[in-house]
Amino acid sequence: MASRGKSETGKLRQNMEEQLDRLMQQLQDLEECREDLEEEEYEETKKETLEQLSEFNDSLKKIMTGDMTLVDDLSGMQLAIQAAISQAFKTPEVIRMFAKKQPGQLRTRLAEMDRDVMVGKLSRDVYVQQKVEILTALRKLGEKLTSEDESFLTENATASLSQFERVTADLGSEDKIMALASSGVKTKT
């Protein structure tokens, strides 16, 4: 019996991760194709995807309250969804790595961005936005940041990222996390 529960938990986790990956890929594809779409079509598709993320988050919340063995494993996924819904993070790739708790890949992405901005392959504005997102994600994953990275975050953090950081400081405050997600969804509809 005990192994059956672990197997079901594993399958559930895998299904949830696949659904999150699909939604994050959908957001990333949308951003990459933005120039090819009419503004209205882009906004409508983005709104639908964010609604799907919100529904996914609601399902995740129900699972977390009903099955305590999944709470720890699903908390990171829920935070990633909160970030996407609240639009604190604008880069689906960063959200995906954050949800999967992949600090190594986040640091690799940061190094690639450092290189790309030096050779002119990445604009300074995009670099700053994504670096702030990655550093915030790394901090939330419990990674140690250099004093330079901390200074960079202090100087460049956006209001929504700061709000995400404050609200999620205590993972136990689920009501506050849900309030952040709700406020992000309400202002976009």
Image: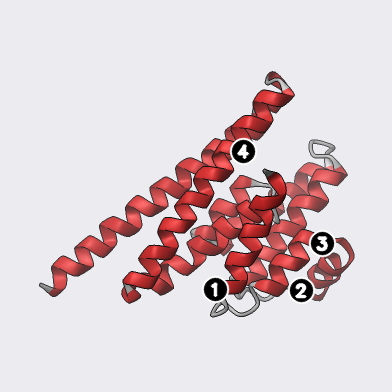
- Of residues 110 and 170, the one nearer the viewer is 170
Mark 2 is surrounded, within 10 Å at the Cα level, by few (under 14), some (14 to 19) or many (20 or more) other residues, namely few
Name the secondary structure under disc 2: loop
Is 81 above or below relative to 126? below
Q: Where residue 13 is drawn, which disc sits there? A: none
Instruction: Name the residue that disc number 3 marks.
Output: 159
The label nearer to you, 2 versus 3, is: 3
Q: Where residue 146 is drawn, which disc sits there? A: 2
Amino acid type indicated by mark 2: Thr
Mark 4 is surrounded, within 10 Å at the Cα level, by few (under 14), some (14 to 19) or many (20 or more) other residues, namely some
Query: How far is disc 4 from disc 1 in space, using C-alphas?
Result: 24 Å
- Residue at 81%, 66% in the rendered image: 153
Instruction: Name the residue that disc number 1 marks.
Output: 174
Mark 3 is surrounded, within 10 Å at the Cα level, by few (under 14), some (14 to 19) or many (20 or more) other residues, namely few
The image quadrant where one finds the C terminus is: top right
The label nearer to you, 2 versus 1, is: 1
The label nearer to you, 2 versus 4, is: 4
Name the secondary structure under disc 4: helix
Instruction: Name the residue that disc number 4 marks.
Output: 47
Q: Which is more N-terminal, label 4 or label 2? A: 4
Amino acid type indicated by mark 3: Ala
- Looking at the image, do the residues carrying marks 3 and 4 touch, with CB atoms under 8 Å apart? no
Amino acid type indicated by mark 4: Lys
Query: How far is disc 3 from disc 4 in space, using C-alphas?
Result: 21 Å
Is 170 above or below relative to 58? below
